[in-house]
Amino acid sequence: MRHLLPLLALLCVLDLFGQGEPMRRPATSTEYWMSAGVEVKPFRKPSGRIFEKRFFRKFRSYVELGYRSQENITDSRLLYTTIGGRYRENKHLAFGLDYRYNWRDRFSRNTGRIDGQVTLSEEFGDLEAAYRINYQHEFTEIDELRSVIRNRVQVEYNAPKFPLDPVASVEVFNALDPQVKGVIGMRYTLSVKFDLGKDHDFEVGIRHDREQGIPDPRYRYIFLVAYEHTLRWD
């Protein structure tokens, strides 16, 4: 328990960053987010070689397809595809870079986006804590918000001899824009991961997004479902 207290304190500190009055009373909405992804080790060790180069051994690539809807699940808000790579230096440090293309509804323009992440993680018995900083840049009009820094703290409990692992996270969104500065949103997520075998990850949860510090802020209540498959050559 003594390891858990500092993590809970950090979650509270991140929450305080999001405290503040929005520019106007926010609208609320309900959404559904669904995604499916495949991760693969793209480089195979050549036949007959005893040792594999460190980078090739630790690098993984992935592709993801996602769908987001309004309260009516057939009313599409966003369809996206992501392709990227992750490099895990060790069990505590990982790097990621990906590109995402968004097909939006008829009232919005389609956009591309790049994300670069650094993740720090540590295990405390059955508890795993992770901090991720993410730089996000959207290729959109110059007068729209383009660059955001995201800071996320996540805690996952790996329940021994039980197929369900609870996960909780808080994420802070900070704008990098001359016209919009500071915290523009908070994201709170509670989810459960299902153990379907070492090559399959299935997660369901609820998420609450709170925009602030921008015109026409919105509060979103989100139901999410995510699946990821690890593809192995052998």
Image (spheres, rainbow, N blue to C red):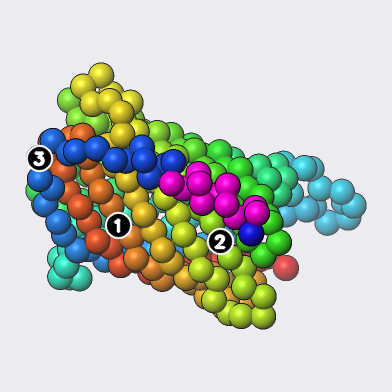
Name the residue at 61% across, 80% down.
162
Q: Earlier in the sequence, mark 3 or mark 1?
A: 3
Disc 1 target residue = 208
Disc 3 target residue = 24
Left or right: where 40 falls relative to 56? left
Element at badge 1?
A: strand
For the residue carrying disc 1, how many other residues have a C-alpha within 10 Å: few (<14), some (14-19), or many (20+)? Answer: some
Q: CA distance from mark 3 to mark 1?
A: 18 Å
Q: Quadrant of the N terminus?
A: bottom right
Q: CA distance from mark 2 to mark 3?
A: 35 Å
Type of the residue with mark 3: Arg
**Residue span colored magenta:** 2-12
Residue 95 against residue 164 in the figure, above or below: above
Q: Earlier in the sequence, mark 2 or mark 1?
A: 2
Disc 2 target residue = 156
Q: Position of residue 152 (x, y in %)?
A: 46, 45
Q: Is residue 97 magenta?
A: no
